[in-house]
Each structure stands twice: as C-alpha cells, then as structure tokens.
Image (tube, rainbow, N blue to C red):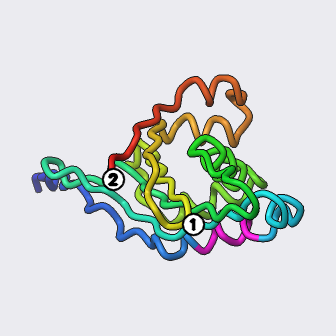
Amino acid sequence: TVWTPTPITPSPTPEPNTAKVVDILNGVMIGADPLMETVAARYSVIDSQVIVDGTTHQAVALQVFVDCQWVYTDGCTPENTFVVLVRAFSMNNKIMGKIQAEIPSTIQTLEVLTFEQMVKTSVIHIAWKDIYDFTEGRINGNQLGSRMIRFAVSP
C-alpha cells in the first residue's frame, strides 16, 4: 500500500466572542478604584471587535472601545484611558488568559479607541505581543509606554 499525505488546509480563524471580552474587562475595571470613580473619572469598555485582514482572512487586530465619564473636571485623556485598560489586562494572571481564550491567536495589534462622554477622541495602537509581555512582566511600563502610537480622531 502507498501512503498519500493529505494536504494541509489552514483552519479558519475561530469565531471570537467579543461580548465576553467586554464583560471580562468591565469586570475588573468597573468598581476597581472607587475613589477615582467618585472624584475623577469612570471608565468602561463599551465595545470590542476583531479586525480581519481582507487578503489573508486572518484576524489581525483586537479593537477595544473605552469610554471615560469625568466627574468634576475633564481628566479623560486618551493616555489615562489606555493606562486604565492596560491595568485591567494585567489585574491578575487570569485576565489575559480569559481574553486570549475568546480571540483568535493570530491577533497582532491592540487598537484602543478612546471616548470621552461617548465622543471618540483618539485611537492608540500597540503590538499585542507588547501587551502580553507587559502582563507577564517581560517588559516594564516605560517600555510599554514608549511603544504605543496615538492618533487623533477628527470630528
């Protein structure tokens, strides 16, 4: 008998559960810092999407939409929003694992769309590997902060 190898066909990108990503992140963000939420600002994830490359049909980016509702004065900078989100990712070692279980392994970029009082203010791009390395302690905050790219959003 002759053995004929079967051709390898790439498996499709698993269907992401972005609603679960929103729930996981809000579970650690909302109520995490009552003092900040009382006197400065409240942050919440309002949406999450996986972006698929049109050519390769692979998931390449995770978009997370974060709204900031300031309390007394406008403290809702895109950078503060990014820091709050990254702290949620790194709250404990289980959070990143839960998120990765809900998204395709082909994700390369995290895009944080920041909102202030439900008005889009900016987009921050950072490599997904950098977020993962930060949560694992392989890079520090200085390194992570220097690797983010912020884009202003025109009205």
Q: Position of residue 112 (x, y in %)?
A: 48, 50
Quarter of the image for residue 57 reads bottom left
Secondary structure of the residue carrying tag 1 is strand
Q: Which mark is residue 45?
A: 1
Identify which residue, 74 or 109, lies in the foreground.
74
Quarter of the image for residue 73 reads bottom right
Q: Is 51 placed left or right of 105 in the picture?
A: left
Q: Position of residue 120 (x, y in %)?
A: 43, 57
Q: Is 41 placed left or right of 63 in the picture?
A: right
* CA separation in Å, label 2 and label 1: 21 Å
Q: Amino acid at mark 2?
A: Pro
Mark sitting earlier along the chain (2/1): 1
Q: Position of residue 18 (x, y in %)?
A: 46, 70
Q: Is 94 placed left or right of 149 in the picture?
A: right
Q: Which residue is mark 2?
A: 155
Confirm whether the magenta stretch covers residue 4: no
